[in-house]
Image (cartoon, grey):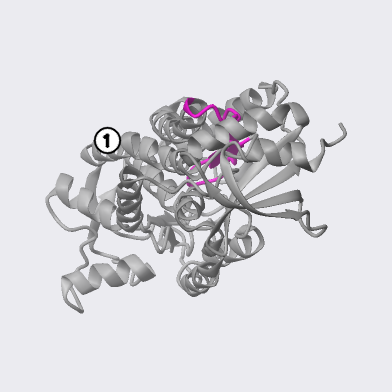
Amino acid sequence: MTLPDTDILSSIVSRVFRVEEVTLGDPKKSYFLRFRGELQTDSIEAYDQLAGALRPYDVTPLFRLEDGRQTILLVRGVLRLKPGKVSTNIILFVLTIISVLFGGAMYSYAGPMPPDMWGQIWTWLTHLWVGWPFAASLLGILLAHEFGHYFAGRYHKTAVSLPYFLPMPVPPLGTMGAFIQMKERPKNTRILFDIGVAGPLAGLVVAIPVLILGLALSKVGPVKDSSYVKTAGQPDACANTAGPGQSYSCPGDDFMEGNSPLYLALKYLVKGRPLPTPTRYDIAPVAYWLRYMFTGHPIPLGGLDVNLHPVALAGWAGLLVTFLNLIPAGQLDGGHVLYSIFGARVNRILPVILVITALLGFFWAGWWLWTFLIFVLGRAHAEPLDQITPLDPRRKAVALLMLLIFLLVLTPVPFTVF
């Protein structure tokens, strides 16, 4: 479609905007016309009115603040959405159900186990049903989280996809989580904020009761290495120097979940004692738990901790998923929230996040992968069409709540293998 004369576009823009300066488009940028001045009405109402008036001309307005001045950029094209196919979403969800059942069976099955790997896999596959408490709990949390985003998007008439679940049939969870795709840019920062916070809040509403129930079902017991008995004629679980009939342990076959302030508090609430409890404190108890939370060491062998019921493991995973999603970078929920508040200035914070995650990698190597992903993807944001509309006081209060939640679910060492 041929663009209308500049005078026609200027007259349309001037209905909502007192134009002080008009500039032709910068070839290095996507806009073809820029207006600077001041809005004459509420920014949300002005955007809706202007977008509707420009749509027949196949033009989309962008509201921006440049050097403290209100600016309207006009770009070519209007997004016209096509109906999406849900077959991929359904297939991935079914595969994830099987994958999480398998992960739950690996964690829950307590019957006889053949010594070879393929025999073990077949045993877990034929006992998938024992993983249902874990699978139902974890999938319930993930569904709440993703549909929190989905329904927030639908409420604001922003096109979003149904959740895409990611199966991964390996312990401890059997899935890499899920995500939704925003099919269009959110209209303004308030909508981006609402979509960003809806997922973590909805997920926590389910995760916290699930975790409390799971902890109530869990028993407190000693922290110890798994042991095996050497049997003549049978393959060993790992290299060892034990003689026939003697027990031995293998490094790397035991798992301890990471701790966050909220998780530590809920363990204390349900079990009435601080956990994990070492055999003795080499430093003050509060300092011990802070050190353990941030480093995962020393492993409290011989001490006491919760032996997680499968439902508790799912609840703990719900807190971990919330924490990872609230990392304030890129397309993560925390990135959406931060961009809603600070706009493009969030990129100034990115180096700080990269340094912190890189340092945490010395205590949990997985953070080095996160550092790389954040470095590569951390500058990509879901930029709203209207970046003039600020967050209102209610949303600013929710932003402070999200900061508090982030600190409560902060898990510097997600898990330790020993």
Q: Residue furthest right?
A: 2
Residue 293 placed where, x, y %? 32, 65
Quadrant containing the C terminus in the rendered view: bottom left
Q: Magenta stretch mostly in which secondary structure? A: loop
Out of 386 and 170, give the one closest to the viewer.
386
The image shows residue 299, relative to residue 158, as above or below, that is below
The residue carrying pointer 1 sits among few (fewer than 14), some (14 to 19) or many (20 or more) residues within 10 Å by Cα, namely few
Residue 30 placed where, x, y %? 76, 51
Residue 224 placed where, x, y %? 32, 60
Q: How many marks?
A: 1
Q: Is residue 230 left or right of residue 176?
A: left
The image shows residue 132, relative to residue 308, as above or below, that is above
Q: Residue furthest bottom?
A: 282
Q: Residue furthest left?
A: 272
Question: Which residue does the image show at 54% across and 61% down from the upper left?
Answer: 238
**For residue 169: magenta?**
yes
Secondary structure of the residue carrying numbered label 1: helix
Q: What is the magenta range? A: 155-182
Q: Is residue 341 left or right of residue 289?
A: right
Task: Report the amino acid beneath label 1.
Answer: Pro
Out of 144 and 17, give the one closest to the viewer.
17
**For residue 381: magenta?**
no
Question: Which residue does the image show at 65% across and 34% down from the upper left?
Answer: 183
The image shows residue 103, relative to residue 156, as above or below, that is below
Residue 344 shows in the view: yes
- Judging by the rendered image, the residue that carries numbered circle 1 is 209
Residue 291 placed where, x, y %? 30, 72
Quadrant containing the N terminus in the rendered view: top right
